[in-house]
Image (tube, helix red, strand yellow):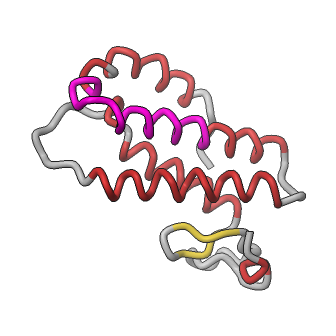
Amino acid sequence: MDTMHRKRNCSVGSCGRAAITSLGQQILCVNHFLLRCYEKLDGLDPRGRKFTSEPIDLAAMRGFIEECSRKALDVSLQCEELSNLERGRLLDILLWAGELFLLLRAPRLTFAESMASADDGMAARAAIPNL
């Protein structure tokens, strides 16, 4: 984690909390980092949406998934003032990013096949309260 972020505030609205990391060129506090990761991973997860014929930018998806997981790991290892809930959410983000990375490596047909297992994963995530 960059010490530069510790000296700055979160760049979201009028948050005012200390920044812990950046994601997509935006400096964020822990709460906004978790929220952005969950929002973006949810939007990228093919198991939570209907199949479309729109082209998928796999390079951009991989890039975000790698950045998200790398930053989540950095925050979890270097930020000492995290609550157990925040640590649990960081672990959830790492696991979800890992699942998506594996889905991206699989042939495109596995996206449709994985829709059947989406109910199990979505039910588990539904138990996590929104930030």
Question: Does 61 appear above or below 111?
Answer: below
Split into 4 quadrants, where in the image is the N terminus?
bottom right
Looking at this view, name the residue that lies furthest to the left.
Answer: 53
Q: Position of residue 16 (x, y in %)?
A: 71, 78
Q: Position of residue 19 (x, y in %)?
A: 71, 73
Question: At 77% from the left edge and 44% from the top edge, which residue is drawn?
Answer: 87
Magenta span main SS: helix
Q: Position of residue 101 (x, y in %)?
A: 44, 40
Q: Nearer the viewer, residue 83 or 80?
A: 80
Looking at this view, name the residue that lies furthest to the right.
Answer: 80
Q: Is residue 82 left or right of residue 51?
A: right
Query: Is residue 101 on the magenta stretch?
Result: yes
Question: At 59% from the left edge and 79% from the top edge, which residue is drawn?
Answer: 11
Q: Nearer the viewer, residue 122 or 96?
A: 96
Residue 110 found in image quarter: top left
Query: Is residue 41 on the magenta stretch?
Result: no
Q: Position of residue 118 (x, y in %)?
A: 40, 22
Visible residue check, residue 36? no
Task: Give the number of callouts.
Answer: 0
Q: Is residue 130 left or right of residue 39?
A: right
Which stretch did the figure color magenta?
93-111
Question: At 48% from the left edge and 33% from the top edge, which residue is drawn?
Answer: 99
Question: Does 126 appear above or below 36?
Answer: above
Visible residue check, residue 11? yes
Question: At 72% from the left edge and 58% from the top edge, which residue is drawn?
Answer: 74
